[in-house]
Amino acid sequence: MSNGRTAQHSLFSSDVVVMRSLSAPAAASPRRSSACTRLNSRSSVAPRGLAGSDLPGGGQELVEYANTGNLRKLEDLLDGAYAQEPQDASSKAVRVAQLRTAAQRAMSQGHVACLRRLLQHGDTRGYDFGFKLGNNRSSAVEAAGAGRADICRVLFENGRVSTEVVNGFGRTALLEAALNGREECVRVCLEFGANVDFATKMQGNTAAHLAAQSGNITVLNILREHGANMNAERFGDLKTPLTLHREHVQKQMHAFTRK
């Protein structure tokens, strides 16, 4: 990873916190008087880096190890340079931002052990990684849609992220998993108490609607076994999951008979 650049990822994207030292002052112009030069040399102060830049790589090494799943080196950093508590609020904010970025990279690459270790480090120090606020709260929704059940489990543990947070489309992790046919993610969401009949505000779709519409019978059966309402009517066309399921089967049969 190169300094000063912003890395973009399709999943759990975040700006990498990169600490750059302030550039040294330009050399004194030869036209200046010797008295002025002596004054400047006495009053000048060595430039200081930004808060937290005293840590290895200014946070880049931490993010790199999380991104590549190098748990051993990640733990060496956390137990070494990152073990010392920041001395001021500014340094603490930088520290939390670095850890949060590293956690997001671990999520995006599916490095569960690294994610757990980073969260454990933050929990013992009372750091808030912000998974319940802003765009980070949909991390579990995106993980569910991508089929990363192990990541969902880590995020749902101890109530770190609620199963009922929604993404920009108003879908919870359960709905996103049902829509994409992620069976194991559906099971994890239900295990942690997800509302099986949660409906989107715009269309009134439940997880059962989405599973039936996409033709995923296995997911539909999992939802039904957990008490999903198969007769819930969505807005507009008032179709139920059972109606959508029948329509999907009829389309398949029609396509089969035309061959």
Image (cartoon, rainbow, N blue to C red):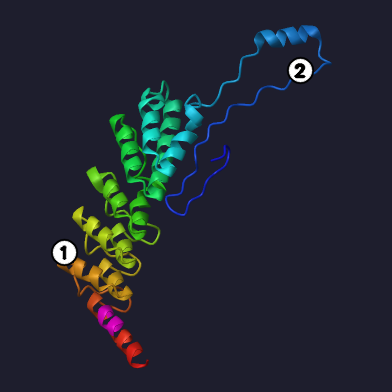
Residue with the mark numbered 1: 226
Mark 2 or mark 1, earlier in chain: 2
Front residue of 44/154: it is 154
The image shows residue 77, relative to residue 152, as above or below, that is above
- In the image, 77: left or right of 209? right
Q: Given the image, on which type of amino acid does mark 2 rest?
A: Ala
Residue at (20%, 73%) from the top-left corner?
Answer: 230
Give the number of callouts: 2
Looking at numbered disc 1 in the image, what kind of residue is underneath it? His
Percent x, y for residue 212?
A: 28, 74
- Which x, y percent locates residue 111? 36, 46
Q: How far from the left and from the top, in percent, is residue 146?
A: 37, 58
Identify the magenta region: 244-249
**Is 66 placed above or below 9 here?**
above
Quadrant holding the C terminus: bottom left
Residue drawn at 40 percent across, 36 percent down? 99
Question: As rendered, which of 211 and 109 lies closer to the eye?
Answer: 109
Mark 2, residue position: 28
Dot 1: what SS? loop
